[in-house]
Image (tube, grey):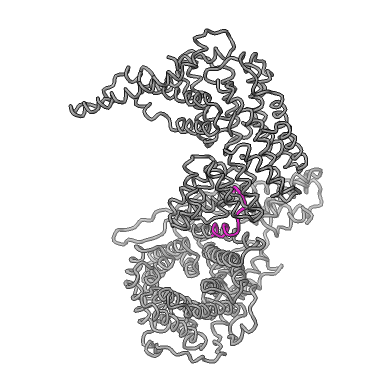
C-alpha cells in the first residue's frame, strides 16, 4: 500500500497543491516497506519450497499448476512491489550517506539497466485473469522508475549502460506504464513526468549510436517550448528550479548535437546559455518551500542536486571549450577555462577541464607550457584522489616525454581507481606486451562499463593471435563494438585522448580496425559472408589501411567477387608509402582476380575485355622486383600467359611482343598467329622459372616440393600443347576433307609441331614421375598422346579415372576419341556416365557429334534425318549455355538449318518458311562467332562462312549491300581454297627432342578418310555469285512499273512491302507530271499508300507471335522424329520500316511546308533503323 500510494500521489505532490501530512511523509516509510516486502518474499520462497517437496512426495501436480488466480495476483503484485521498492531504496541509501558516491550512483544505473532489459523472469508465471503483468507494473510505476535510474542524464552521461534498442524499449515501457496507470487506475501523469520522458528520449537519439538526430533536435526544442511556456500550457513544468535544471539539460544536448554535425558556432551558443544559467543558480539553495516529489524527489535532494550541478557545469564548460577548439580559437578556449578555474578555485571539474585542455594543446603541437600542463594535472589529481582521469592524462604527458616507466605507473594508478578507464587502458596497451595486459582487461570487463571496449578488443586480439581461438575472439570483438568508447569516442569528453598522442596518431578509426579484426577472424573460420559484412561495416566507419584492404580483397576473391577484389587492390597500390610486402600481395591478388574475370569474359565472348584484363594482370606482376619473385607469382604469371590460348589470334595484334620473339617463325603463319605463339612462349618461360624455384626448395618442405613440381610440370605441358594446337588451328586443324591439317598430320610434316608435342609429353611424364597419382598429369599426357598414339592416350585417360573418378575431362576425352574412330556405342555409353558426373560443354558436344553421325544413316528418310540434326543442334545449344565453345558454335551452325527439302512444298508452308529463315539467321550468327573466336583457321568453316555471306547477299534488299556481301563471300572462299592447297612451311630445324613414344607403332591405327570438299558445289555457288555480280549494274537492276506495283497491292493487300513499292512508284510518277492538279492528286495517293505501308509494317513488327507447326500424320510402324519448335512470325526488315517512315515524313512535309519540324523525331528514328537511308539523311540536312 505504501508503494502504491507513493506512486499514485506523485502527480498531486508535483502539482504544488496542499496535501496531508500522511502523503508528504510517505517517502519516509519507503525503507520500512522495503524491509517488510523483502521479508515477505523470503517467507513465500520458503513456503513454496516446502510445498514443492510435499507435492513431489505425493506425486501430484506442482504448486505452480495448482495456484489459484488470486494467489497468482498476489504473487504478481508482490514481485512488482519488491522491484519498485528496491529501486527506491537504492537511491535513498545513496542520498542518506554523508556524500554522494559517484560509483554508487553508476552502480544503481547499471543494476537498473540489467533489471529493465532482463525483465521479471517469474512475472509471466503469475499472469492471471484478475491482474495482468502490464497492469501490475502500471500500478506500482516500476517501468518509470527504471527509466529514471537507467537514463541518469541529469548527473551522469545519458543512458550509460544501454544501446539504442534497449533504451528505446525501456522508454516505451515507461510511456506505456503512464498510459495504463491512467486507463486502469485513474492516475494522470504530471507535466514533469512527460517532460522527463521527452528529454530522456532526446538524449537517447542524440547520444547513442543509431539514434535519430532529427528526432532528437525536435524533442529538445519541444521540451524547451514547454519549459518556457511557449506552447500555451499553464504551469507546464512545475517550479522554477526544476524548469531551470531541465532547460540546462536541453541546451547541453543541443550543443552536443551541433558539435557532432560540425556546427561549432551553434554549439557554443547553446553551451554558453546553459553555462550562464548554471553560474547564476546556487545548488546549495535551501529548497524547503519546494515540494518533495515522491518518485522524482532525487532531483530535489540536496546531495544529488549538487552532483547534478557539478556534472552539468563541467559538461557545458567542456562543450564551450570544444566549440572554440573546433573553431580554431584556442586562446578563447584557454581564457574561458582559466576564468572558470578562477571563479571556482576548488572545483575539481573546472581544474580538470583546464588541465585536459593544456594537454590537448600540447599533443596537437600548439604552444603550451609543458610544466604548467603537468602541474595542472597534479593539482586536479590532488583535489579528488578517487578520480582516475587525472592520472590517466598524466600518463599521456609522461608518455609524450618518452618516460615509459612513469607513464605506466600513472596508467596503473588510474586503472586501480577505475578498472575500465578508456584512456588509461589504451595507454597501458601501448606500453606493455599484450599478454601482460590481459589481467587488466579481465578486471575491466567485470565492471560492465560502457567504455571498456578497449579491454574487449585487447582480449579478442589475444585470443586470436596468441591462443588461436577465433570463436572466442569473435565474441570479444562483438562486445567491443557495442561499447561507446569504440563506436563513438566523440561522445566522451576524454575521447580526444584515446588516440591523441604522437605514438598512436592514425587516420584509421578504432571502430573500423575492430571490424577488420572481426572480419579476419570470420575469414579464418570460413565464414566469408559474415567477413564481407564486417569489412563493409569497417569501411563505413573509417578509412581502412592497405593491409585491411588486401584482406578484404582476398575475401572478395574467395567469394567470387573478382571485380570488387581488383578494385580494392587498385586502391592499395594507389596508396602512398605502401610497404613492399603489401604491394606484392595486392599485385598478386589483383592478378588472380583479373585472371578469373578474364575466364568469365571468354565464356561470354568478350575477347577484347579478356585481353585487357590479362595485360593489366601481367603488367602488375612484371612490375614487381624480379629478383625477389616468389614461386606463386611466377606460377601465376605463367597461368596468365597460358590463358592466351583461349583468345583468337587477331586479339594479339594489339599486344606488343618482345624482340627476338619471331626467331624461328613459320613463314606460312600470319603475324597475328606468331604474336599469339610468342605470348604463349612467355608462359612457358615462366613455368620453367617456377620449376627452378620449386626445385631449390628446402628438404623440410619435401611434400610441398613434390606437389609443386608435379603441378608446374603439368602446367608446362599444357602450355606446350596449347602452342602446338595454335599452330595446327592456324593451318586448318579440324577442317576435314583432304587438307591433311590435323595435328596428327602436322606432327609428321612440321618439325615445329612435332617438337612441341614431344616436349609436352616429356613435361607430363616428368610431372607423373614426381607424383604418380596426379590425375591432372595423366589427363594432360593423354591429351598430348592422342595425336601420336590413340591407344596409349586411352590408357592415360583411364589411369586418370582410376586415380580420381570425380573429374570429367578424361571421360569427355575418351568419348570424343571413340566418336572420332566411329565407336559410337562406346562413346554414347561414356557420355551417359559423364552425364551423372558433371554438366560439361564437351559432353554436349559429344552428344551432338554422335547425333550427326546417326543422321547419316537416315539418307533415305529426310524427316528422320531432320530429327537427328535438330536434336544435335539442341545439344550444341546446351553446350553454349555452359560456355561459348568454338566446336559448339560450328556444330550449331551446321545442324540448325532445315534439312527436309519436302517441307517447303507441304501444307505448312508458312511455318516452314519462317523456320527456315530463323534457322538461317541462327546458322549465320553461329558461324560468325566461330570465325571470330578461332580467327578463321578452319578451312572448311571458312568456306561455309563464305557461302553464308553469298547467301545473305542474295537475300539482301539493298543492291549495294548485296553486292558487298557477295564479294566478301567470294573472297572468303578463294582464300580458304588457296590455304587448302598450300604446303606447310618447315623453316625451323628439328630440336632433336627425344621421346619414349615410337611414332611408327601408331601408324596402323588410322581414322577413316573424311573425303574431299564438295568442290563442285562450291564452284557452282561461285559461278552463280559471279553472274549476279555481273548483272548488278544500273541497266540491269529490276525496275517496276506503276501498273505492276498496283497489281502487287491487289494480289497482296496485307503486304506492307507492296504498299511501300506502290508509294515509291506514285512518288516517282508525280515528279514527271506537268499538271499541278494531277501532281497534287498523285502525291496525295502516294502519301496514303505510304501511310498504309507504315501501318502494316508496324503492325507486323509490334504484333509478332509464335507460329507452331501442324502435326503430321505418322504411322506407328514407321515412327519418325521431327522438330515441333514454334517460331516467331515474320518480322519486316529494318530498311523497309525505315523507308516507309522517311517517305511518310517527306510526303507529309510537302503538304505542311510551315511545320516540317513535327517530323524531325520520326526522321531521326528512321535514320537509326537504317543509317544508309538517303531520304531521311537529306530531309535532316545531313
Is residue 590 found left or right of 1006 in the rendered image? right
Please count the marks in the image: 0
Q: Position of residue 491 (x, y in %)?
A: 61, 39
Picture coordinates of residue 408 (x, y %)?
A: 57, 51
Decide if residue 409 is on the left or right side of residue 841. Answer: right
How would you classify the magenta stretch by its main secondary structure?
helix
Q: In the rendered structure, does residue 532 fall within the stretch colored magenta?
A: no
Magenta span of residues: 540-553
Residue at (68% x, 20% y) in the render:
228
Q: Position of residue 615 (x, y in %)?
A: 61, 69
Along the viewing direction, whichever of 537 and 673 lies nearer the viewer: 537
Q: Is residue 859 above or below residue 203?
A: below
Does the image show residue 736? no
What quarter of the picture does the N terminus occupy? top left
Q: Seen from this angle, which residue lies furthest front?
A: 382
In the image, 266: left or right of 670?
right
Does the image show residue 494? yes
Residue at image point 81% right, 52% down: 1074
Q: Is residue 809 above or below residue 339?
A: below
Name above or below for residue 407 compared with residue 809: above
Q: Nearer the viewer, residue 1152 or 468?
A: 468
- Residue sitting nearer the eye, 563 or 300: 300
Rendered view: 348 above or below 530 = above
- 720, 118: nearer the viewer: 118
Could you tell me which quadrant the C terminus lies in?
bottom right
Q: Can you give x and y, in whole percent of width and height, for residue 193 in the image? A: 56, 20
Amino acid at each position: 500500500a505504501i508503494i502504491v500510494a507513493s506512486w499514485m500521489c506523485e502527480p498531486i505532490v508535483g502539482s504544488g497543491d496542499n496535501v496531508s501530512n500522511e502523503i508528504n511523509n510517505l517517502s519516509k516509510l519507503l525503507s520500512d516497506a522495503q524491509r517488510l516486502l523483502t521479508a515477505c518474499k523470503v517467507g513465500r520462497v520458503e513456503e513454496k519450497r516446502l510445498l514443492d517437496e510435499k507435492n513431489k512426495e505425493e506425486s501430484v501436480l506442482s504448486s505452480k499448476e495448482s495456484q489459484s488466480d488470486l494467489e497468482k495476483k498476489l504473487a504478481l503484485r508482490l514481485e512488482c512491489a519488491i522491484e519498485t521498492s528496491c529501486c527506491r531504496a537504492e537511491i535513498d541509501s545513496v542520498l542518506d550517506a554523508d556524500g554522494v558516491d559517484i560509483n554508487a550512483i553508476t552502480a544503481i544505473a547499471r543494476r537498473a539497466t540489467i533489471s529493465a532489459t532482463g525483465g521479471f523472469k517469474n512475472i509471466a508465471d503469475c499472469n492471471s485473469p484478475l491482474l495482468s503483468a502490464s497492469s501490475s507494473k502500471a500500478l506500482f510505476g516500476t517501468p518509470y522508475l527504471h527509466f529514471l535510474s537507467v537514463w541518469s542524464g541529469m548527473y551522469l552521461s545519458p543512458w550509460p549502460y544501454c544501446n539504442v534498442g534497449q533504451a528505446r524499449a525501456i522508454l516505451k515501457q515507461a510511456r506505456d506504464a503512464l498510459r495504463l496507470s491512467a486507463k486502469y487506475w485513474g492516475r494522470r501523469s504530471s507535466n514533469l513526468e512527460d517532460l522527463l520522458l521527452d528529454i530522456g528520449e532526446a538524449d537517447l537519439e542524440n547520444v547513442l549510436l543509431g539514434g535519430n538526430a532529427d528526432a532528437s533536435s525536435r524533442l529538445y526544442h519541444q521540451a524547451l517550448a514547454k519549459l518556457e511556456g511557449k506552447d500555451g500550457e499553464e504551469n507546464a513544468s512545475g517550479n522554477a528550479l526544476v524548469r531551470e535544471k531541465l532547460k540546462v539539460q536541453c541546451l547541453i544536448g543541443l550543443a552536443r548535437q551541433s558539435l557532432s554535425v560540425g556546427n561549432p558556432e551553434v554549439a557554443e551558443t547553446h553551451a554558453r546559455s546553459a553555462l550562464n544559467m548554471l553560474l547564476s543558480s546556487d545548488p546549495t539553495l535551501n529548497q524547503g518551500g519546494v515540494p518533495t516529489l515522491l518518485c522524482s524527489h532525487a532531483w530535489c535532494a540536496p546531495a544529488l542536486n549538487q552532483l547534478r550541478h557539478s556534472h552539468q557545469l563541467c559538461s557545458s564548460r567542456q562543450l564551450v571549450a570544444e566549440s572554440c577548439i573546433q573553431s580554431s580559437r584556442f586562446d578563447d578556449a584557454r581564457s574561458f577555462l582559466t576564468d572558470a578555474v578562477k571563479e571556482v578555485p576548488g572545483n575539481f571539474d573546472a581544474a580538470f577541464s583546464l588541465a585536459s585542455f593544456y594537454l590537448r594543446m600540447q599533443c596537437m603541437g600548439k604552444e603550451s607550457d609543458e610544466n604548467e600542463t603537468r602541474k595542472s594535472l597534479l593539482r586536479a589529481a590532488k583535489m579528488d584522489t578517487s578520480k582516475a582521469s587525472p592520472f590517466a592524462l598524466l600518463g599521456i604527458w609522461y608518455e609524450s616525454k618518452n618516460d615509459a616507466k612513469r607513464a605506466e605507473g600513472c596508467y596503473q594508478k588510474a586503472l586501480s581507481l577505475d578498472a575500465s578507464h578508456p584512456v588509461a587502458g589504451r595507454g597501458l596497451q601501448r606500453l606493455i606486451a599484450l599478454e601482460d595486459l590481459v589481467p587488466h582487461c579481465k578486471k575491466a570487463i567485470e565492471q560492465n562499463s560502457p567504455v571498456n571496449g578497449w579491454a574487449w578488443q585487447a582480449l579478442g586480439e589475444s585470443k586470436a593471435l596468441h591462443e588461436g581461438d577465433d570463436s572466442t575472439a569473435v565474441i570479444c570483438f562483438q562486445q567491443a563494438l557495442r561499447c561507446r568508447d569504440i563506436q563513438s569516442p566523440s561522445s566522451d569528453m576524454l575521447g580526444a585522448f584515446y588516440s591523441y598522442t604522437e605514438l598512436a596518431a592514425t587516420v584509421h578509426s578504432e571502430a573500423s580496425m575492430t571490424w577488420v579484426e572481426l572480419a579476419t577472424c570470420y575469414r579464418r573460420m570460413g565464414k566469408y559472408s559474415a567477413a564481407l559484412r564486417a569489412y563493409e561495416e569497417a569501411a563505413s566507419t573509417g578509412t581502412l589501411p592497405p593491409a585491411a584492404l588486401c584482406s578484404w580483397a582476398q575475401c572478395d576473391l574467395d567469394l567470387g567477387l573478382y571485380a570488387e577484389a581488383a578494385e580494392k587492390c587498385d586502391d592499395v597500390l594507389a596508396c602512398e608509402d605502401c610497404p613492399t610486402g603489401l604491394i606484392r600481395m595486392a599485385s598478386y591478388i589483383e592478378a588472380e582476380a583479373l585472371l578469373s574475370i578474364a575466364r568469365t569474359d571468354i565464356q561470354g565472348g568478350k575477347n577484347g575485355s579478356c585481353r585487357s584484363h590479362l595485360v593489366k594482370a601481367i603488367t602488375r606482376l612484371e612490375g614487381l622486383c624480379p629478383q625477389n619473385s616468389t614461386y606463386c607469382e611466377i606460377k601465376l604469371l605463367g597461368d596468365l600467359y597460358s590463358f592466351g590460348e583461349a583468345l583468337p589470334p587477331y586479339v594479339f595484334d594489339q599486344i606488343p611482343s618482345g624482340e627476338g620473339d619471331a626467331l624461328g617463325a613459320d613463314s606460312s603463319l600470319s603475324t597475328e598467329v606468331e604474336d599469339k605463339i610468342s605470348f604463349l612462349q612467355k608462359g612457358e618461360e615462366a613455368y620453367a622459372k617456377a620449376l627452378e624455384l620449386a626445385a631449390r626448395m628446402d628438404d623440410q618442405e619435401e611434400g610441398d616440393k613434390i606437389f609443386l613440381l608435379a603441378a608446374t610440370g603439368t602446367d608446362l605441358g599444357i602450355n606446350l600443347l596449347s602452342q602446338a594446337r595454335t599452330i595446327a588451328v592456324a593451318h586448318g586443324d579440324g577442317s576435314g576433307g583432304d587438307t591433311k591439317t590435323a595435328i596428327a598430320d602436322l606432327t609428321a610434316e612440321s618439325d615445329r609441331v612435332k617438337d612441341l608435342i614431344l616436349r609436352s609429353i616429356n613435361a607430363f611424364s616428368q610431372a607423373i614421375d614426381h607424383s604418380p597419382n596426379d590425375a591432372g598429369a595423366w589427363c594432360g599426357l593423354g591429351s598430348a598422346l592422342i595425336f601420336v598414339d590413340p591407344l596409349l592416350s586411352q590408357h592415360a585417360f583411364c589411369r586418370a579415372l582410376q586415380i580420381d573418378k570425380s573429374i570429367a575431362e578424361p571421360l569427355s576425352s575418351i568419348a570424343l576419341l571413340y566418336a572420332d574412330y566411329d565407336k559410337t556405342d562406346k562413346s554414347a555409353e561414356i557420355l551417359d556416365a559423364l552425364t551423372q558426373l558433371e554438366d560439361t560443354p564437351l559432353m554436349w558436344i559429344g552428344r551432338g557429334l554422335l547425333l550427326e553421325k546417326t543422321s547419316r544413316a537416315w539418307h533415305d528418310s529426310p524427316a528422320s534425318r531432320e530429327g537427328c540434326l535438330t536434336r544435335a543442334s539442341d545439344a550444341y545449344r546446351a553446350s553454349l549455355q555452359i560456355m561459348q565453345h568454338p566446336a559448339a558454335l560450328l556444330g550449331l551452325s551446321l545442324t540448325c538449318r532445315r534439312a527436309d527439302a519436302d517441307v517447303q512444298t507441304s501444307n505448312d508452308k508458312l511455318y516452314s518458311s519462317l523456320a527456315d529463315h530463323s534457322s538461317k539467321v541462327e546458322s549465320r550468327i553461329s558461324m560468325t562467332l566461330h570465325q571470330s573466336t578461332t580467327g578463321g583457321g578452319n578451312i572448311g568453316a571458312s568456306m561455309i562462312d563464305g557461302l553464308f555471306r553469298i547467301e545473305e547477299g542474295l537475300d539482301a534488299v539493298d543492291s549495294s549491300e548485296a553486292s558487298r556481301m557477295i564479294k566478301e563471300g567470294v573472297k572468303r572462299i578463294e582464300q580458304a581454297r588457296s590455304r587448302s592447297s598450300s604446303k606447310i612451311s618447315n623453316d625451323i630445324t628439328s630440336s632433336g627432342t627425344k621421346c619414349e613414344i615410337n611414332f611408327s607403332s601408331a601408324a596402323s591405327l588410322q581414322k577413316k578418310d573424311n573425303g574431299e570438299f564438295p568442290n563442285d558445289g562450291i564452284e557452282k555457288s561461285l559461278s552463280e555469285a559471279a553472274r549476279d555480280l555481273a548483272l548488278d549494274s544500273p541497266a540491269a537492276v529490276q525496275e517496276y512499273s506503276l501498273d505492276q506495283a498496283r497489281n502487287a497491292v491487289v494480289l497482296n493487300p496485307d503486304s506492307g512491302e507492296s504498299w511501300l513499292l506502290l508509294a515509291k512508284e506514285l512518288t516517282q510518277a508525280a515528279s514527271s507530271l506537268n499538271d499541278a492538279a494531277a501532281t497534287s492528286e498523285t502525291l496525295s495517293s502516294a502519301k496514303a499508300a505510304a501511310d498504309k505501308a507504315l501501318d502494316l509494317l508496324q503492325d507486323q513488327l509490334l504484333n509478332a507471335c509464335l507460329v507452331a507447326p501442324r502435326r503430321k500424320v505418322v504411322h506407328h510402324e514407321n515412327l519418325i522424329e521431327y522438330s515441333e519448335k514454334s517460331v516467331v512470325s515474320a518480322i519486316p526488315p529494318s530498311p523497309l520500316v525505315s523507308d516507309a517512315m522517311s517517305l511518310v515524313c517527306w510526303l507529309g512535309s510537302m503538304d505542311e511546308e510551315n511545320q516540317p519540324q513535327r517530323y524531325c523525331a520520326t526522321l531521326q528514328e528512321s535514320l537509326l533503323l537504317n543509317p544508309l537511308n538517303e531520304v531521311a539523311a537529306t530531309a535532316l540536312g545531313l
